[in-house]
Amino acid sequence: MRAMFLKSMLFTLVFAAPLAIAGVAWWSIRDSIDTGVPPESMRAELAGMVNARWSGEAATRYGISAAQWRSRMESTYAKADLANLEHAASAPDFDNMSRALLGAGHAPVAVSAKALGSPGSDLVFTPITPCRIVDTRNAGGRIAADGTRSFVAYSATDFTAQGGDASNCGVPENASAISVKLAASRPSFNGYLTAYPSDVARPLASSLNYISGVDTSNESHLKLCRPGCPTQFSVYSFRETDLVVDVTGYFIEPEATALDCVVAQQTGNLDLLSGLQTRNVSCPAGYAAMGGGCGGPLGIGISNSQPLVNAGRPQGWSCDLVGSLLSVISYQVSATCCRTPGR
């Protein structure tokens, strides 16, 4: 059997409900995740099965005719989640049928978590104050013509061994890529630089073209070797030159964060002799309703329970309720409201 997501509840309209019993515990219905439903073509067949099995007992319980109960259930069947309707049609007794249409009593289907981003895609960029991580004029000396040298893009302490800053520049360990300003200083002849991850073959492409004797620079994004590489990137120079690398930001995969959820509730009393009454509760700004429920003591009837949708977004919960004709009955409407925190 399948679990359900944000769908209809049982129409239990009561004409002559008993007095509310003081002290009776509240009940509420919660939704769970749905991963599939029967075909739409089965809706009428499933509704017919529920009617055939339970209209007689419903008439006895609610003091109405079986035909009246079937008539009042038509709108519920039309809007009901098909997975819940399927549960109701195969329920062993009336109470389980009711709970099935209300979405209760079914274990959620396990859903495997998906990664938010891989080390090579869906990355988050963080700009930083420009910081020097390589300067061969201060350490290591010029890169020889047709020569390659490898460097680190992360340091727990500083980049002074590469001629860079006496800090770690704020670049985190295992960043996927960095945004840099590459500079060739005093190249001996016209040529070019190619910067690339340390663990791949040098590509046949230029990262920077330079002119003999002229300091030249440009902006570039540089993918890094990760994780746990002794060096993160390499630089090839066609001609002899000094190299300067300033980092201006880094790219890294997003971090998974737990949902931030709150429960919004509204309580009160239903009006006497007023028939169907709608009660709503709204989520705080920025939150979306992930589930909800309606409840009250014995004597309350629930005609419908569904998300409160505004501009296509579930922003709360709505309940159509029927109280007792003989006494005031209290109610509760609740919504589980969640948002995804930013990185």
Image (cartoon, helix red, strand yellow):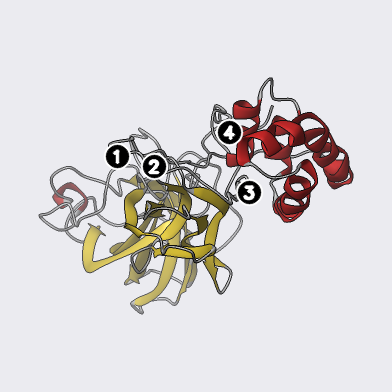
Q: Mark 2 points at which residue?
A: 297
Q: Where is residue 262 in the image (x, y as percent from the top left)?
A: 31, 52
- Cα–Cα span, label 1 and label 2: 8 Å
Q: What element carries label 1?
A: loop
- The amino acid at mark 2 is Pro
- Cα–Cα span, label 3 and label 2: 17 Å
- The amino acid at mark 4 is Arg
User: In the displayed structure, would residue 184 be above or below residue 63?
Assistant: below
Give the number of the disc on residue 22: 1
Of the two numbered discs 1 and 3 in the rendering, the one whose residue sits closer to the viewer:
1
| Cβ–Cβ under 8 Å for marks 1 and 3 | no
| Cβ–Cβ under 8 Å for marks 2 and 4 | no
Say which label, 1 or 2, has the lower sequence index.
1
Q: Position of residue 6 (x, y in %)?
A: 57, 49
User: 261 or 97, which is in the foreground?
Assistant: 97
Q: In this view, does 279 lie to the left or right of 68?
A: left
Q: Is mark 3 on a helix, strand or loop?
A: loop
Q: Within 10 Å of the Cα at label 1, are there few (<14), some (14-19), or many (20+) other Cα atoms?
A: few
Of the two numbered discs 1 and 4 in the rendering, the one whose residue sits closer to the viewer:
1
Of the two numbered discs 4 and 3 in the rendering, the one whose residue sits closer to the viewer:
3
Image quadrant where one finds the C terminus: bottom left
| Cβ–Cβ under 8 Å for marks 1 and 2 | yes
Of the two numbered discs 2 and 4 in the rendering, the one whose residue sits closer to the viewer:
2
Q: Is mark 2 on a helix, strand or loop?
A: loop
Q: Mark 4 points at which residue?
A: 99
Say which label, 4 or 3, has the lower sequence index.
3
